[in-house]
Amino acid sequence: MSVSATVAVHTAGQDGITMQEVILPSPTGHQVLVTIEASGLCRSQLRQMTLHGSGAPYLLGHEGVGVVAEVGPDVRDLNVGDRVVVTWIPVTGEGVRTPQWATVDLGDGVVAETIDGIFTWGTHTLVDESFLVPLTAADTDPALSLVGCALITGLGSAVYVGECSLGENVVVIGAGGVGLAAIAGAACAGAAQVLAVDIDDAALALARELGATSTLNSRTSDLVEHVRATMGRGGMRGADLVIDCVGETLTANQALECARPAIQGSGIGGRVVVAGVREVPITFEGAQFVIDQKRITGALAGGMGRREILTTLDAIRSGRVNVGGMVTETARLADLGKAVERLRRGEIHGRALVVS
């Protein structure tokens, strides 16, 4: 059956979004029609809108949670009524089918495309089953939508890419949605110290609730000096792991300077994970890589695949990860445009959800 849906559309050169009424057809092949209950507001969507200089209109939103309304004839592992997370990370592996990216007919011969293969800013989505993660009937928290992007990006940057281990000292620069998830991941991995760094005291207060053992406002205090004074291992001052969730030259270099040099004879220095993305190049002073034997790694979606996402869901169910604590406010879908502008102005701390 086809369904009348409301979806958010971004047109090239447009500052914000428009909400449009569309007709989504019955799913075909491996498609699944999902009624969206909640979707997260991710800053990467702002970046995508800024880069959208030409071409077809975009459908936005890449983390959501909802209920299966209808399945295509080739779908075998999902049924009507199943609860699912919608994520832009598809099932991958040898011999795995390439998923079909969603498009939506806007009428008058105009077809809207997707940037990540999915869209979640709307009342419904029509999505390839490869982008859906099954939940249990008890998984009713709308904050589970963050598993689609923010949580896995931050938590994975700490646990999988950063390889945080028991007793390590960790610094997280940027306590937004991804940063909060990185803090939760480091705490879950058993880090001894987790320092949250931001320029907003409200964000830092929230970071403490999610596992930060200490906080620092980098606008009023010297970050590198503080880390070298409070963290160290084997006589080498600095952090074992630093996660930069901002991704600017300033913060990336601060992260590198905060990472401890190698302990003599061990050949291993501190690790830096860059999880934030900006549109400007980042440059580093090379001696820290050679002499101090520090390492720097980029992280896309926290290096997570389907197995890691399922493990993360188990950690949420067991109470080891508080995904609900990352949500600081909720907006109605009708007010999505206003919420996007507030996100653009930096007025949203933590993660905001949009509910239908």
Image: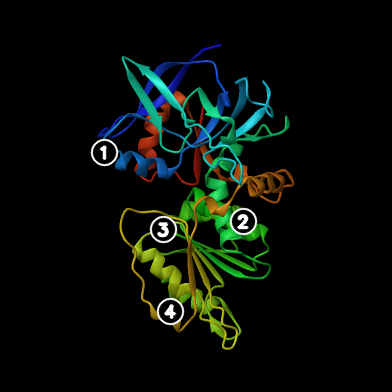
- The label shown at residue 288 is 4
> Which residue is tagged 3?
199
- The label shown at residue 187 is none
- The label shown at residue 185 is 2
Q: Quadrant of the N terminus?
A: top right
- Pick the residue in front: 44 or 258: 44
Count of number-bearing discs: 4
Q: Nearer the viewer, mark 1 or mark 2?
A: 1
**Residues tagged 1 and 2 counted as in contact (Cβ below 8 A):** no
Please state which amino acid type lies under the numbered disc 1.
Gly
Q: For label 2, count other residues whose C-alpha is less than 10 Å away and answer few (under 14), some (14-19) or many (20+).
A: many
Of callouts 4 and 1, the N-terminal one: 1
Please state which amino acid type lies under the numbered disc 3.
Ile
Q: Up-down: is 254 above or below 313?
A: below
Q: Up-down: is 344 above or below 164?
A: above
Please state which amino acid type lies under the numbered disc 4.
Gln
The image shows residue 75 at horizontal and vertical percentages of: 64, 26
Q: Nearer the viewer, mark 3 or mark 1?
A: 1
